[in-house]
Amino acid sequence: MKRQVALVLVLMLVFLAACSNNGGNSTEGTGGEGQGQGTQTEDPGSNKEEATANGFKDGKYDPPISLTTVVGLDQNAAVFKKGESMEDNVHTRLVKERLGIDLKYDWVVTNTNDAYKTKLRLMLSSGEKMPDVVRYRGDMETVNLLLDSGQFMAVDELIEQYAGDLYKEGLELDPTIWYPITRDGKKMALPILDYAYNGNQTMFIREDWLRKLNLEAPKTLDELEVVMDAFVNQDPDGNGKKDTLGLATGFKNGFNTWMTDIGFVFGAYGALPGSWNPGEDGTLVHGSVEPKAKEALLRLRDWMSKGYISQDSALKDEVGGSEMFTKGQAGIMVGPNWIPAWPLPDLEVNVPEAEYKAYPLPTGPDGIAGAAGNNPPVNGYLFINKNAKHPEAVLHYYNFFFDNLANPEPDSEFALGFAEGYDYAVLDDGTVIRDNNTAKEHAELFPDVDLNNSLPNPFFYTLTYEGARIPTLYADSMVKAAEGGELVTPYEKMEVGGRKEQNIHAMKVIMDQLDVYHKNYYMGPLTDTMQSKNELLSKLVNEAYNKIIYSQSPPEEFDKMSDSWHKSGGEQITKEVNEWYEEVK
């Protein structure tokens, strides 16, 4: 009887081993196409002879599977060849041919007036069944509604089993990537990775004004004041009028914004308004009510009284504030590395002789500089329905774009772009056309494309908005170019080769000053007290800040506001924020 039991056990082990070798849920048969940078589509990986239990073999589902989704078309994504649409285009055909994934769109809307967000939220409020995968980037309130709907699965095991190396490496770059989408210790969505440090801001200065007035670029706030005073009072534009400003600002939307920011003034004193950062004891404190912020407000009050910044600053948003610089009115503007691509070309139109250059953010009285930045490299999330038949298909899809299009090899299929005749074309002499104006001269190379519009860019059709981005690749490539390195790879030639010199230099300035940027450490859902008190507390802060900057209230207004903020819910919010922080960190 013992021998019979032993024989049965041996047979069971053999059977289990056979099942494992023929497509169990092991990582070795799941996504060989996602195992290395630059892998070609003809060679999806080292596991091409193995099949997984979900039917994905040799980098493809055979027979094809369906993956349902919904989409809101932004302006740049709504450009198609004649006869193509979001449901049928070069992207959907490629994905079906190469991966065996048939993308099905339950609905498509043009994303004007937040139509996509509105439709998603209506679905959530009515309890309507969600598609297999939902993508979203934007307000965290909607992200939290999606997370709390109960319709989407945790992705921890999916990532472990199916994510390719490049995606995993990007996720490991910053652990706070997971903070906004963690619930009860589970990761509840797939982050769509973006380029790191791309939102960090630096200081752009009119180089021609500095030269005309025989000034050096400022390194401290005191030196910045000297430059701004000269820009205001020494007629740098030479029109004989006192009509210029020192700094282009717009703080209608707050005091820590994505462009025309004045947060660097607060950062030079060690505070960041609107941001939760570790205090001396390691717990999170709110920068708007930190005592150090008061000194920054007094500095801004002085700048306003001397005309260094516009009296209209409180009425201007970020774009409105930038127009002070692009119209040639202000000599300094703070913004991300990429503003030479937009909106600063307007300066070249309005003031053709203008020159500008990026410089490091200035330091404060204690020799420190500071600004918001170094945020997690995330450009939205993919939420996977817990009832999806093939949840792993989303990662097979994403892996394909990482391996083939994020940083393509020379002479590879995607070395010049997504698809010839769409986002590029090649002349007989090897010249690559990527812009509308040149394309119009060679219309025969872009059949069925409306060349009065922008060229169709299939990267914008993807589930992940822009294909796949390796977080560190952009900054590394830009710094390489700034230091005189040769642009060798297709990515370097396409992404960096088309950038303006001011853009490339700005990224180098940012990377050389990387330690001055501080992320907002609270990325969770609205706490109970936030839901009822946030509006009141924000009003308290904004009113006090504006009154102090515009000299409508004495400096002591800050102390009153801070005390009221804590008593009116801020103290309880601080407690709730730190409870969340202890859980996720």
Image: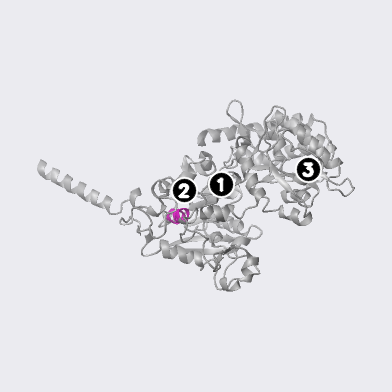
| Residue 41 percent across, percent down from the top left | 41, 59
Give the residue type that dot 1 points to: Gly
Mark-to-mark CA distance, 2 and 3 = 46 Å
Residue 117 forms part of the magenta stretch: no
Q: Identify the residue under disc 3.
A: 211
| Residue 69 percent across, percent down from the top left | 50, 60
Q: Earlier in the sequence, mark 2 or mark 3?
A: 2
Which structural element holds mark 3?
helix
| Residue 257 percent across, percent down from the top left | 69, 44
Mark-to-mark CA distance, 2 and 1 = 27 Å
Q: Nearer the viewer, residue 476 or 265?
A: 476
The answer to whether marks 2 and 1 mark residues whose Cβ atoms lie closer than 8 Å is no
Q: Residues within 10 Å of mark 3 (few under 14, many from 20)?
A: few
Q: Identify the residue under disc 1.
A: 485
> What colour-coding does the image apply?
one colour
Give the residue type that dot 2 points to: Tyr
Q: Which residues are magenta?
A: 394-403
Q: Earlier in the sequence, mark 2 or mark 1?
A: 2
Q: Residue 212 occupies which quadrant of the picture? A: top right
Q: Identify the residue under disc 2.
A: 167
